Amino acid sequence: MGRADLEPEQQWETMVGFYQDFMDSWPVAMKCMQELVTEIQLTEISKTLYPSTSLTSLGISAFNDYGDRRQRHNPMAYVKCDKLAENFHVSFQMGQGNTVKEADFPVLEDNKKMLDEINKWVIQAKS
């Protein structure tokens, strides 16, 4: 998911709706992801980075185009919510599937620390 014809802020708005739609079917599994994308939509990240999803994972990239995201030299982060462990697992990648490092962050009301780490990774690694 992610539409190449939309600006980042519009894509985050679409992503909030995407997870909200799944809340009816999988409320426990989707709640933390829906809350996270809603939080991101209110931050500076939503103005510069692009979302994508494979349902349970949220991709965050500086590249709008799917082909660009897959290239090995382009950084991105995948966020997955582990509701049982009450944490977000983040895979920091150089190109889709090439994990460079991983980290766990607690699911919080304010996920600023995790979002700062993701933003730093995606922006600095892109430079």
Image: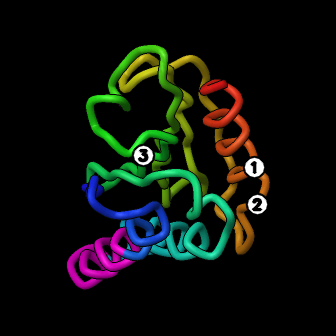
What amino acid is found at the position of numbered circle 1 in the picture? Answer: Asp
Q: Residue at x 43, y 17 (%)?
A: 98
Residue under numbered circle 1: 116
Contact (Cβ within 8 Å) of mark 1 with mark 2: yes
Helix, strand or loop at label 2? It is: helix
What amino acid is found at the position of numbered circle 2 in the picture? Answer: Lys
The stretch in magenta equals 14-26
First-in-chain label (3 vs 1): 3
Residue under numbered circle 2: 112
Q: Residue at x 36, y 68 (%)?
A: 15
What label does residue 103 carry, if any? none
Q: Residue at x 68, y 64 (%)?
A: 44
Crowdedness near tag 2: few (<14), some (14–19) or many (≥20) residues, C-alpha within 10 Å = few
Does 109 sit above or below residue 84? below
Quarter holding the C terminus is: top right
Q: Quote the CA–CA distance across marks 3 and 1.
A: 15 Å
Q: Position of residue 26 (x, y in %)?
A: 27, 73
Q: Residue furthest right?
A: 113
Q: Quote the CA–CA distance across marks 2 and 3.
A: 17 Å
Does 13 sit above or below residue 107? below
Left or right: 2 as drawn, with respect to 88:
left
Crowdedness near tag 3: few (<14), some (14–19) or many (≥20) residues, C-alpha within 10 Å = many
Residue under numbered circle 3: 59
First-in-chain label (2 vs 3): 3
Does 18 sit above or below residue 77? below
Left or right: 31 as drawn, with respect to 91:
left
Give the camera-side residue of 84 and 9: 9
